[in-house]
Amino acid sequence: MTLIVARKIKGRATVVGDTGLSAPSVLRPHPYWGTVKTVILKPSLSVSYASSDLAATHNLISAASRHEQAETVIRHLLAGHKKHRSSDFIVTHRPLYEEGIIVDTLYLICGGAIQECETAWIGERDCFNSFQKHFHAASDNEHSASAARGQYAYDHIRNLMTEAMESVIADRVGTVRGFAIAVDSRRNGYEYTPRSSNASGNMEPVRLTAGEWTPIHLGSAETGASHISILSTLLPDPPAVAIYMPLIKTLLSFVASRGYNFWAVRCDSHSDINSVTKEFFGFEFKGALYEHGRTYMLD
């Protein structure tokens, strides 16, 4: 299944989740491709899901996204949830933005009902318990407690949440796999959080075919690790995320308008990323890139 955790920090929402998918036909959890489970439908609206029927959930989100008003999108998701009960949702919405003030609304759609929350999670309980253990172990020290109250509290707590999710992935709890993807609430709206990190998992070489969706085998923590970089689009619309893996010269892009799996393209170097994505998708990315022991900035 999955784990998605969201919370509001001084009025601003942040969401973090994994990207692994598990095959329901096997008894042991088996990661075989990935997807981003928090979809930014527009700069002021994001939808996260935990589902036992991915095809139906993706169809539901696609249908809901055609509505312009966020309230209509939310009602559509709630109606689909009540009808099928195969998916739970977390929705973040920016109803207004005043200069210097961000006020987000966080909704949980679960158990046949909707409620407005300050914190929420969906997915596997064992995974959430593991997440809480890692999060509180990192936050329950004097330095972290001070940072959580300071000027940069939002970034600090979001980083703790992302690191806790990475720990759950590394521990291979439940079926949570892949990469930890976080969504930020910024002045221009929601965006995927650019960052560089060392991700657990053996990134197996794949045969890349231009113009096709390609399953990416994420491997396991026991078989190796690879440096990755999480990138976000320069413009808030269309909101998209890319994962660059230099060891296998692969760029995974997730663009909701093109489907719900990663789009894999060959990318030999960090210097090629924006020319590749501009050719394939028509827009460019930003963020910090890790390659051959050095960090490069795309901004």
Image: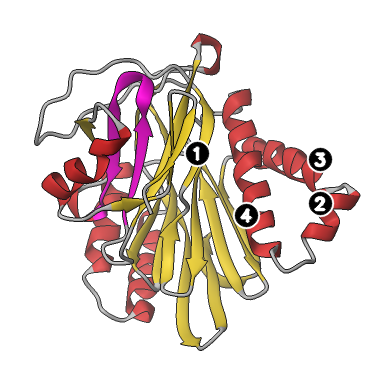
Q: Are marks 3 and 1 in contact (CB under 8 Å)?
A: no
Q: Tell me the SS state at disc 2.
A: helix
Figure quadrant of the C terminus: bottom left
Q: Earlier in the sequence, mark 1 or mark 2?
A: 2
Name the residue that disc number 2 marks: 144
Q: Callout 4, which amino acid?
A: Arg
Q: Callout 1, which amino acid?
A: Ser
Name the residue that disc number 3 marks: 137
Q: Nearer the viewer, residue 32 or 89?
A: 32
- Mark 1 or 2: the one toward you: 1
Label 2 Cα crowd, 10 Å radius (few <14 / some 14-19 / many 20+): some
* 55 horizontally vs 18: left or right: left
How many labels, in total?
A: 4
State the extent of the magenta-drawn residues as a range. 240-256
| Residue 174 picture location, percent across and down | 57, 28
Q: Nearer the viewer, residue 232 or 10?
A: 232
Q: Nearer the viewer, residue 56 or 103?
A: 103
Q: Earlier in the sequence, mark 3 or mark 4?
A: 3
Q: Callout 3, which amino acid?
A: Ala
Q: Nearer the viewer, residue 283 or 120?
A: 283
Label 2 to label 4: alpha-carbon separation: 12 Å
